[in-house]
């Protein structure tokens, strides 16, 4: 597929440049409670995280929900995965890993939960990238996708201070109603699509920013946090994420 906004060299450089990649994943890790509730309600036992290197949710679900989990990505740095497993009290054999191209790989196994976090927005054909998740999903299994909301204040910050990273994202995909319509067209049911989170923002290249830029972003972050303490609601303008859930 030639409409992707990134390639393997991009991800290799991206992950090898990251600081703070290895840490102990806590029980309250973002989206973890939502995944735990789905697992408990449905009695699921297996999950695969697509485009998930270094495998935070693969490890989270193994560590806290004792699920059989698989990490799938186009680029996997085994050494970093092993470090992350060790810090979280797990062994290399506790999870499965598949390193392959999502658009050409033919899955041999289907899973109760198919997950991706920050994957689909890197492709221009949003419906097609969602469709690649479905061959991995069992009947009555749950699709769980999240992506950043760059149509928010956070997106303005990205565009203003990290245009290179902003341009690696297909902004038009960040539309809950559109995402829901694609899932329905693909034959999925029980579709939910909504903004998630009161307010947050981040910069991937924070370390290279000037002191003035850092101070401005910090003040904007603080203002947003205060505002959402007073008016705690999720919205297009403020919420940092979009969540998409559906059943096959």
Image (spheres, grey):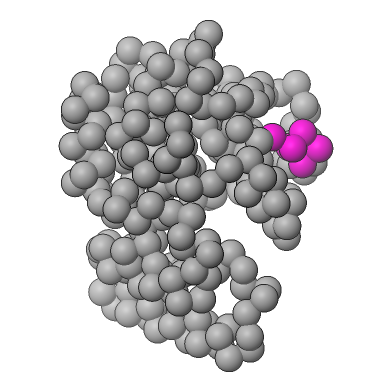
Which residue is situated farthest in the bottom direction here?
A: 212
The residue positioned 74% from the left and 51% from the top of the image is 16
The residue positioned 52% from the left and 32% from the top of the image is 50
Q: Quadrant of the N terminus?
A: top left
**Where does residue 144 sit, x and y in percent of width and height?**
38, 35
Front-most of residues 191 and 36? 191
The residue positioned 51% from the left and 20% from the top of the image is 104
User: Above or below — where is 7 with respect to 172?
Assistant: above
Q: Quadrant of the C terminus?
A: top left
User: Above or below — where is 209 with respect to 237?
Assistant: below
Front-most of residues 19 and 16? 16
Q: Is residue 44 left or right of residue 215?
A: left
Is residue 21 visible to us here?
no
The residue positioned 58% from the left and 42% from the top of the image is 7
User: Above or below — where is 177 with respect to 73?
Assistant: below
Q: Could you say which quadrant of the image residue 146 lies in?
A: top left
Q: How many marks?
A: 0
Name the magenta segment's main secondary structure: helix
Q: Could you say which quadrant of the image residue 171 lies in?
A: bottom left
**Where does residue 177 sit, x and y in percent of width and height?**
19, 46
**Where does residue 88 sit, x and y in percent of width and height?**
72, 40
Is residue 129 visible to us here?
yes
Query: Is residue 220 magenta-colored?
Result: no
Q: Which residues are magenta?
A: 76-81
């Amino acid at each position: 597929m030639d409409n992707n906004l990134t390639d393997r060299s991009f991800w290799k450089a991206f992950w090898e440049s990251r600081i703070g990649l290895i840490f102990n994943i806590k029980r309250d890790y973002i989206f973890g409670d939502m995944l735990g509730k789905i697992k408990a309600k449905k009695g699921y036992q297996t999950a695969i995280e697509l485009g998930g290197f270094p495998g935070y949710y693969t490890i989270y679900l193994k560590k806290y929900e004792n699920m059989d989990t698989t990490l799938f990505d186009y680029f996997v740095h085994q050494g970093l995965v092993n470090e992350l497993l060790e810090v979280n009290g797990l062994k290399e054999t506790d999870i499965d890993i598949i390193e392959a191209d999502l658009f050409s790989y033919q899955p041999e196994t289907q899973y109760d939960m198919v997950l991706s976090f920050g994957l689909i927005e890197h492709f221009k054909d949003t419906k097609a990238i969602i469709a690649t998740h479905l061959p991995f999903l069992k009947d009555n299994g749950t699709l769980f996708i999240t992506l950043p909301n760059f149509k928010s204040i956070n997106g303005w910050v990205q565009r203003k201070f990290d245009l290179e990273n902003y341009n690696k994202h297909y902004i038009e995909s960040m539309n809950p109603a559109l995402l829901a319509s694609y899932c329905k067209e693909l034959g999925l049911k029980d579709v939910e699509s909504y903004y998630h989170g009161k307010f947050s923002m981040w910069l991937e290249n924070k370390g290279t920013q000037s002191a003035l830029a850092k101070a401005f972003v910090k003040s904007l972050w603080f203002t947003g946090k205060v505002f959402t303490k007073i008016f705690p609601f999720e919205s297009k303008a403020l919420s940092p994420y979009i969540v998409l859930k559906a059943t096959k």
